[in-house]
Amino acid sequence: MRGLLIAVFFSFISAAATAQGPSCDNIHVVDTRIPIFPPIARAAHLQTSITFTVRISKDGKSTISYKSGPNQGVYATLVNNAKDFLEGREHQSDHHEACDYETTVEFRTIPAQAESPNNFQQLTIVNEHYARLDVLDYKPTVNY
């Protein structure tokens, strides 16, 4: 009986921990920074999606928490750069309660083009829940 009570208690705690707060539907997000694709990650041809939970307080300040995606080794630089990008967001609203939302930043490399410069970068922001950063693979250079 005691084991059953403990199991019920821990399942209640885990359910409460995953529940999100009120919806952030009435908040307008303005991105003020561009994410950086670190050269070391680009040279290693790393591609990944990283998910964060954004907690917006009543005064509009946000707290960014890593949720999922690779975060070890060179991937840690992608996590840090994605977090810096999200910390630069401005959340605008006339009035709101504190709320949570999840957002994903995807880093992708696309094949290099012979006529394109190596510094090509394209940021696509679908909405506050998803942003994608595309860069060209480095073109090999040959010295004669």
Image: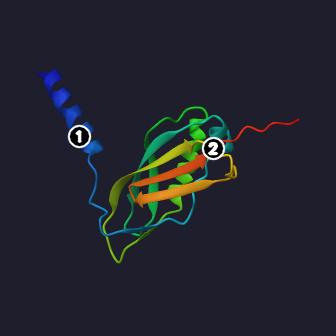
Q: Is residue 5 left or right of residue 103?
A: left
Colouring scheme, one of rainbow, by chain, secondary structure, one colour = rainbow
Image quadrant assignment for residue 29: bottom left
What's the CA distance linking mark 2 and mark 1? 46 Å
- Residue in the image at 68% along x and 46% along y: 114
The residue carrying mark 2 is: 112
- Using the image, tell me which numbered label, if any, was put on residue 15: 1
Tag 2: Cα neighbours inside 10 Å, few (<14), some, or many (≥20)? some
Nearer the observer, 123 or 88: 123
Callout 2, which amino acid?
Ala
- Residue in the image at 31% along x and 63% along y: 24
Tag 1: Cα neighbours inside 10 Å, few (<14), some, or many (≥20)? few
Q: Is residue 113 placed above or below 86 in the rendered structure?
A: above
Outermost residue to the left: 1
- Residue in the image at 31% along x and 70% along y: 96
Callout 1, which amino acid?
Ala
Q: Position of residue 45 (x, y in %)?
A: 60, 36
Q: Is residue 9 left or right of residue 142?
A: left
- Using the image, tell me which numbered label, if any, was put on residue 126: none
- Residue in the image at 34% along x and 56% along y: 100
Total tally of numbered discs in the picture: 2
Q: Position of residue 129 (x, y in %)?
A: 38, 55
Image quadrant assignment for residue 72: top right
- Quadrant in the picture for the N terminus: top left
SS type, badge 1: helix
SS type, badge 2: loop
Outermost residue to the front: 115
Q: Position of residue 101 (x, y in %)?
A: 35, 55
Contact check, label 2 and label 1, Cβ < 8 Å: no
